Amino acid sequence: MRASRHGFTLIELLVVIAIIAILIGLLLPAVQKVREAAARMRCQNNLKQLGLALHNYHDQFQVFPRNNPLVTRSSDGRAFVERPWSIDLLPFLEQDNLYRQWNLTLGYAEGNNRNLVRTAIPMYKCPSSPTQAIETFQPPSAAFSADSTALAGSTFQAAPVEYFAPLSVRRPPMTTADPLDPGLLQQVNPVRMATVTDGLSNTIAFGEVSAFPRGLIRGNLPHPTFPNNAAGFGFLGGWNRTLYIRTDATGATLNGGNCLMNCTNYAGVNLYSFHTGGANVSIADGSVRFLRDSVSMDALYRLTAVADGLPNLED
């Protein structure tokens, strides 16, 4: 008797392959959601560590660090960013060795600082962002005269910083004619806890502004006017501050609409993240919140101004 053979027909094989493809198609979005949830949690943890470092700094010096002060050096009359918060907080983020090597009398592009600026600080970068640990930045404007002289028009490499501290905020409706109120980290006069009369739990300390040095608009497209981000922003030793400017819905036109989040990452004029529906912010009491991109202009103003008398936290 001839032994019978059992096997898949071509149709059965195609059916099995189709089922496997469907299962993979169903599984991939779930895997991506899990990865994004994990990245978002790590991003929140970074902001938590920044908040704790901010408190430890205040405990030691009785003030919060300054926000990117541009000072003129008396020896040669050149301007540089002196002791930005991204440098001042290093000892409180287990980066004391880097802090001790940083020359506080020089700009980020001068002397050994130019090498140190390439030191990646994991807590300064959001895991969801496509930005590399080290990026190439454009030479700064003439305002940063010490660094622009040192670079002589050449680009340079630096470690991105994707969490920005509010410097100030215009009162609604946030036109260029509206008065500015101070944020938590000031450029010249340091803020003390006692002067945050709205309460630390109602005040933003840091917010996400991701993907420097690219200038992006909504949908992560290149900015049509500013494809390269503002020089001097978004890296260790440079300027890392938010100064909200309303854009249109696409993010392409500054002062063209009511969008203040996830419309553009240009020069810190908007909060900008790679999380769906909003961005993480560190609150001055050390907590971390996810602020939805539907947040109103009034609520964002209240969360940023430290003494407007209108404490409010909108989820």
Image (cartoon, rainbow, N blue to C red):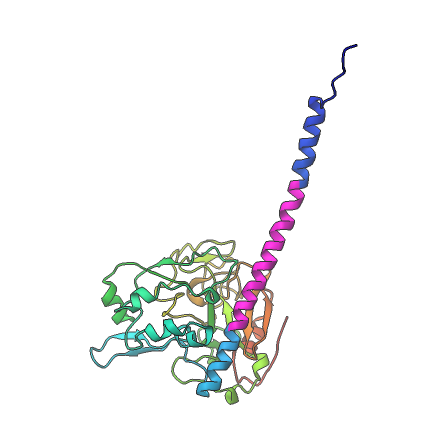
2 is higher (above) or lower (below) than 23: above
State the image coordinates of residue 249 (x, y, percent, origin top left): 53, 59
Q: Nearer the viewer, residue 235 or 97?
A: 97
Quarter-of-image position of residue 118: bottom left
Quarter in which the C terminus is drawn = bottom right
Q: Is residue 276 visible?
A: no
Indicate whether residue 310 is drawn in magenta.
no
Front position in the image: 116 or 21: 116
Residue at image point 63% right, 73% down:
314
> Which residue occupies the foreground of this view, 178 or 18?
18
Left or right: residue 292 compared with residue 67: right
Residue ranking furthest to the bottom = 194
Q: How many marks?
A: 0
The secondary structure making up most of the magenta span is helix
Q: Residue at x 53, y 70 (%)?
A: 47
* Image location of residue 51, percent across then percent down: 52, 75
Pick the quarter of the image with the N terminus. Answer: top right
Relative to 30, say whether 274 is above or below: below
Q: Is residue 73 left or right of residue 134?
A: left
Magenta stretch: residue 36 in it?
A: yes
Q: Quadrant of the rendered structure where residue 6 is?
A: top right
Asked if residue 18 can be seen in this view, the reply is yes
> x, y percentage for residue 105?
28, 77
Furthest residue to the left?
Answer: 76
Q: Residue at x 68, y 40 (%)?
A: 23
- Residue bounds of the magenta highlight: 24-49
